[in-house]
Amino acid sequence: MAIVKSSTQSLSVSQRVTAGAVCLFVGASLVFLVGMSHISAAHNAAHDTRHSIGFPCH
């Protein structure tokens, strides 16, 4: 049986805020870029998600 050692590293508050801001930007960009897309496959793929967050797509 192998012993596996793992370690964790705490992030500073500024690193956590930066990571959260980047994730928020990427997520919002994906939702809004797909929301403005006129490609039917992209529209259909994100349709329910957009409606669940109140984003108008019709």
Image (spheres, rainbow, N blue to C red):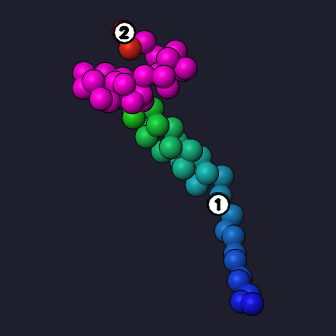
Q: Residue furthest top?
A: 58
Q: Position of residue 8 (x, y in %)?
A: 69, 70
Q: Which mark is residue 58?
A: 2
Q: Is residue 11 magenta?
A: no
In the rendered image of this protein, does residue 55 appear above or below residue 2? above
Q: Position of residue 32 (x, y in %)?
A: 38, 26
Q: Is residue 32 visible?
A: no
The quarter of the picture where the N terminus appears is bottom right
Of 14 and 5, which appears nearest the observer?
5
The residue located at (34%, 24%) in the rendering is: 43
**Element under disc 1:** loop
Q: Position of residue 14 (x, y in %)?
A: 60, 51
48 left or right of 12? left
Confirm or deny contact between disc 2 and disc 1 (CB under 8 A).
no
Of 6 and 1, which appears nearest the observer?
1
The quarter of the picture where the C terminus appears is top left
Report the mark closest to the observer, 2 or 1.
2
Instruction: Tally the numbered discs.
Output: 2
The residue located at (71%, 82%) in the rendering is: 5
The residue located at (71%, 83%) in the rendering is: 4
In the rendered image of this protein, does residue 29 appear above or below residue 2? above
- Magenta stretch, overall SS: helix
In the rendered image, which residue does mark 1 sit on? 11
23 left or right of 16? left
> Marks 2/1: CA distance?
42 Å
The residue located at (69%, 75%) in the rendering is: 7
**Element under disc 2:** loop
Amino acid type, label 1: Leu
Q: In which quadrant of the rendered view does residue 44 lie?
A: top left
- Range of magenta residues: 31-56
Q: Earlier in the sequence, mark 2 or mark 1?
A: 1
Amino acid type, label 2: His
